[in-house]
Amino acid sequence: MLQDRIRKLFGDYDSAIQSVIAGVLVLEQEHISYKHPRVKDQIDEIITHTASKEAERLEKAKARRK
Amino acid sequence: MKLERITLENFRQYYGRQHLNFAKAKERRVTVIHGVNGAGKTSLFLAINWCLYGKSVDNVKVIDNVGELISKEAINRAGVGECVRAVVELAFLHDGRRYVVRRSLEGTKKQGGSLALNDTDDFTMMRTDEDGQAKRVSNPIGTMNAILPVNIRTYFLFDGEKIDNFAKPEASAEVKDAIYLVLKVELLVRARRHLEAIAQDYRKDLKQTSGGELRDLIERDENARKEREKAEKRKAELSDGIESAHRKIADIDRRLLEIQGARALQQQRDHLGRELKQRQSELDSLVNQIRELTTGAYPIVAKPVVDRALQILDEKRERGEIPSSVRKQFVQDLIENMNCICGRPFLDGSPEHQRLLNLMSSRLPGSLEDDVLDTSAALRPFDERIGKLRNDIDASMKRRTELIGLINELQAELDDVGRQLRGSPLEEISRLEKQRQEFRTDVESYNAEIGSLTERIKNLTEEIAQLEKDIGKAQKDERRGQLLSIKLDLAQRSADALGQMYQAFSDDMRVRIEAKTKEIFKRLIWKDSHFQDVLLGPDFNLEVIDRYGMFSRSDLSAGERQVLSLSFITAMSRTSEEEAPLVMDTPFGRLSSHHRDSITKHLPELADQLVLFVTDEELRDQARKNLEPRIGTEYRLEFDRKTSCTEIVEVNR
């Protein structure tokens, strides 16, 4: 499937980037028929979700180092 | 996506409820729908489009200038005020799940026979989940965009006679759009653009959040706390020092009482000390009393204003303006009774009557007159209060002066006692008194330092409280800043990743489509030996190379252009690797038998599902023979001249 092929394109990037790209691509697909889709807030939600997880992961790693 | 069944109810010339099953078996995947011109092939084709997308989605027109969608026969048969409804229901499979979409439009028949249509049509999408239950899809447009977006539908559901667009010289933009949309390159482009924009927003936000402020605040807080701790420690030390000095002074005083030559002086000092303490206490309470008196001394400040007010009132009284010697009500009663105060009656318009009327008009309104009288009464004793207040303050101040004098005298006497003791010929007395003096000096010095420290501790405590608030805010900002920083990093790196991959993916897709188009074109075109190659360059120009190595797209006949376009469309469908039907309205109308034969031979292999709307002339002889083994279902559209309605009739096979 083309979708899998696209997903594999980003296989070498870290999981957070893959997660953001996958979420944004699904969103873009859902709005593909719109010339000017209003997706900014939803993209922000996707990024915020992944960023929060990243922040949590960094916090834990910092605590382990201490 | 694989179509299963379409059901129409009162849609255009399809009166009543009718349905049609689409062939979807692997070997027999072709559905053929025959009909003469005007029988309803295009209406059926429209029904599929309308059901999936409505009349338009966003700015994409799906159905335009096609007249009434609701069956005229149904409208004709309905009574005035009756509701008439057109419904199209389409069942299809996608990604292993079954979907049923239903669109309906209704209106009410008016006098005169026309229909008052409802503003919008009704669209529902149901999906059968793993548990076999059909559930309503909450986001049908988004779901449809994930299955077959409206702007991609034209590459799968198309009018066969109009598909030569891709092969026209000026069509590179359309070719590019088609590749970008069908092969999802557009997704990468849009995702990158939107992520770049959002990264830019994050960057702006990040600039506004504080940088390094928290560290500075924490450092200041730590320093303030250290300083306060130090001050408190020093204050405690000083308090201990004062206590110790007081103990030592008490020891010295006791010792002096024991020494013959110092006893009387020490006793005198004890007595003076007690009296001094008493006077000082008296002075303290007197100072408080004076403070209270002066706080309540506003009448003294207000006196000039009160005096002026009384003066004004007196002047007005002298002029007879207030208060009237005669009450308003009294004058009013006299006028009403037309009787003088002496009891003698008077006539209307007489001098007596006129005088009373003048009195009434020059009098103040009753309530205001009362207010003036009340104010005057309230202001009169003001002077007395001021006098008493002044006397009280003067007496207190006098007593204060006396007390200060007494205290100074007592202090002087105490100093004298100390001087006498220091000057004692007895060395021990003199030494003890000197020591006592030093301790007293220490206590005073310690008290002064404690005062300064207390003030400093108070200021530091206030500063720490403010710093705590600022640190809380800065921590919040910093956490937000940290998250924003991660968000910016993610957005930017994702956009960069999409940018890096986009070009490679786009080129890869173009090359794949080029190869696939060439392969299909060579299979479908009957002059396969004449055309050597098909090129799709980086500029997305679809080009055909003939046996002489020359660009020959402009030499293509209309039928050959149609074959090239069809090759390109099927190549996209194959390259996309998505299961999709190919629904073609009048696909072979302009094609000669050579092309018709080769297309009918190869097309079923190039599509997962093929739905052909054809005239009898389009599908006959070899073409019919070619398709025959792949046809799963076949229908005939029978137009009834009497009713102008079409009936879908299944052809028995």
Image: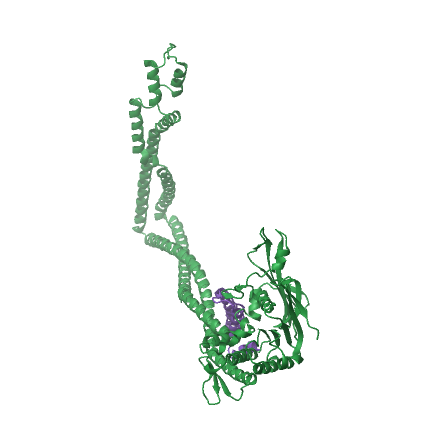
Chain colours: A purple, B green
| Residue B638 seen from this side | yes
B34 lies left or right of B226: right
Dividing the picture into quadrants, the one containing residue B612 is bottom right
Residue at 33%, 16% in the rendered image: B354
Image quadrant holding the C terminus of chain B, namely bottom right
Relative to the observer, which residue lies in front, B640 or B259?
B640
Image quadrant holding the N terminus of chain B, namely bottom right
Q: Position of residue B293 (x, y in %)?
A: 36, 37
B468 lies left or right of B598: left
Q: Position of residue B469 (x, y in %)?
A: 44, 58
Q: Position of residue B486 (x, y in %)?
A: 47, 70
Q: Of all residues shown, which one is farthest toward the front?
A: B642
B423 lies left or right of B583: left
Dividing the picture into quadrants, the one containing residue B299 is top left
Where B135 sits versus B518, above or below? above
Q: Of all residues shown, which one is farthest toward the top?
A: B344
Residue at 31%, 51% in the rendered image: B422
Q: Position of residue B292 (x, y in %)?
A: 38, 39
Relative to the observer, which residue lies in front, B103 or B423?
B103
Where B241 sits versus B262, above or below? below
Q: How many marks?
A: 0
Relative to the observer, which residue lies in front, B105 or B653?
B653
